[in-house]
């Protein structure tokens, strides 16, 4: 397609047709055969692209051609979306919502009808991750349901997802769909203790030189009536300082009770699982 200005200079300033003026001596834009043929070919090609056959008696060919081409384009987009959707059936994605969005189902281990979700059931059968029975099903596997009309989804609730090892050797001996319990990599701590056997500590007090011990002894006492003692008499005592006989240098033996066999215990700490910092989401499966 091209403007008429590509075929003649007798056009308006913007390259469009002009009517001209006899008074002003301005000629109108002439209809050039090449331009008319170009327009004709464009229209015929449009009709042909839509499947229309040229007809001199049909004034609606262009209308049908345009509608047909638009309809085909819409269908093409729809087919591409459908194909893309079919290719993603069975994929797992995380959503920050409490219920599965349209076109998805929560990975909660629940049952689905085979007749309602034929594409997903077809995917499940080819997945290599379909358990032989619901009783033997692992949490990350599909289940056969009742064996006739239903099948069950993997249960991904509360789980982290990990790529299957597939022979790499990082996560050995793992089945597709299997659950792995929490664990810490083998490591050492900075201290340890072992059980101690029974033993008896012993020792002696420091040697003491010769010495005496001082004490107060009764020098005399007087008895009178009206006392507070059991015999009814009052006794008045007077004391004086006295010393024991001098003891020669000597030692005192020190005996400590035996310590029975025992162990030192380091208390546990932490919670019920090993985990990184995380945010909870809803794992869903594409229908």
Image (cartoon, rainbow, N blue to C red):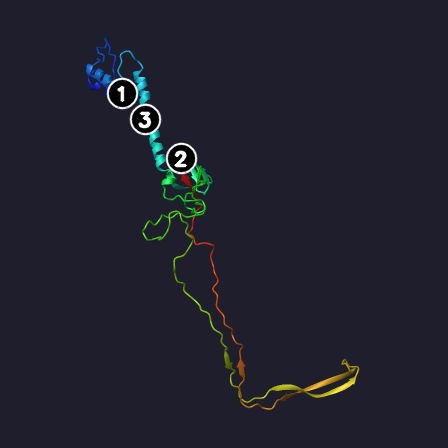
Q: Which of the pair 141/205 is nearer the observer?
A: 141
Q: Nearer the viewer, mark 3 or mark 2?
A: 2
Label 1 and label 3: CA atoms lie apart by: 14 Å
Residue at point 34% right, 35% down? Answer: 84
Q: Position of residue 219 (x, y in %)?
A: 69, 89
Label located before the other in sequence (1 or 2): 1
Q: Position of residue 52 (x, y in %)?
A: 28, 18
Would residue 131 be found to the left or right of residue 56 on screen? right
Q: Place residue 17 in its image quadrant.
A: top left
Q: Place residue 274 in its image quadrant.
A: bottom left
- Disc 3 residue crowd, few under 14, some 14–19, many 20+, Cα 10 Å: few
Q: Position of residue 227 (x, y in %)?
A: 77, 81
Label located before the other in sequence (1 or 3): 1
- Disc 1 residue crowd, few under 14, some 14–19, many 20+, Cα 10 Å: some
Residue at point 30% right, 17% down? Answer: 62
Label 1 and label 2: CA atoms lie apart by: 40 Å
Vertical arrangement, residue 173 with respect to residue 129, above or below? below
Q: Position of residue 207 (x, y in %)?
A: 51, 85
Q: Are marks 1 and 3 in contact (CB under 8 Å)?
A: no
Label located before the other in sequence (3 or 2): 3
Q: Secondary structure at mark 1?
A: helix
Residue that badge 1 annotates: 46
Residue at point 32% right, 21% down? Answer: 68
Q: Are marks 3 and 2 in contact (CB under 8 Å)?
A: no
Residue at point 72% right, 85% down? Answer: 237
- Disc 2 residue crowd, few under 14, some 14–19, many 20+, Cα 10 Å: few
Residue that badge 3 annotates: 73
Residue that badge 2 annotates: 118
Q: Examine the rendering and report whether any part of residue 90 can be seen.
A: no
């Amino acid at each position: 397609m091209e403007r008429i200005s590509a075929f003649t200079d007798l056009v308006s300033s913007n390259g469009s047709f002009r009517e001209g003026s006899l008074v002003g001596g301005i000629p109108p834009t002439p209809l050039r055969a090449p331009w008319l043929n170009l327009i004709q070919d464009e229209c015929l090609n449009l009709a042909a692209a839509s499947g229309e056959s040229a007809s001199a008696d049909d004034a609606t060919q262009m209308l049908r051609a345009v509608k047909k081409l638009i309809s085909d384009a819409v269908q093409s987009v729809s087919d591409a979306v459908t194909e893309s959707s079919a290719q993603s059936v069975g994929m797992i994605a995380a959503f920050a919502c409490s219920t599965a969005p349209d076109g998805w189902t929560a990975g909660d281990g629940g049952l689905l009808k085979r007749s309602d979700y034929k594409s997903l059931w077809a995917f499940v059968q080819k997945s290599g991750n379909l358990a032989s029975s619901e009783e033997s099903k692992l949490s990350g596997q599909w289940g056969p349901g009742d064996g006739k009309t239903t099948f069950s989804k993997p249960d991904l609730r509360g789980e982290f997802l990990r790529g299957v090892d597939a022979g790499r050797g990082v996560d050995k001996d793992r089945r597709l769909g299997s659950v792995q319990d929490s664990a810490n990599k083998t490591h050492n701590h900075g201290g340890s203790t072992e059980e101690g056997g029974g033993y008896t500590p012993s020792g002696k007090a420091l040697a003491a030189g010769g010495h005496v011990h001082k004490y107060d002894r009764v020098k005399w006492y007087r008895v009178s009536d009206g006392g507070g003692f059991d015999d009814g008499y009052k006794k008045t005592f007077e004391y004086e300082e006295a010393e024991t006989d001098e003891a020669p240098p000597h030692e005192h033996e020190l005996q400590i009770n035996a310590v029975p066999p025992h162990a030192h215990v380091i208390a546990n700490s932490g919670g019920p699982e090993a985990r990184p910092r995380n945010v909870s989401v809803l794992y869903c499966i594409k229908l």
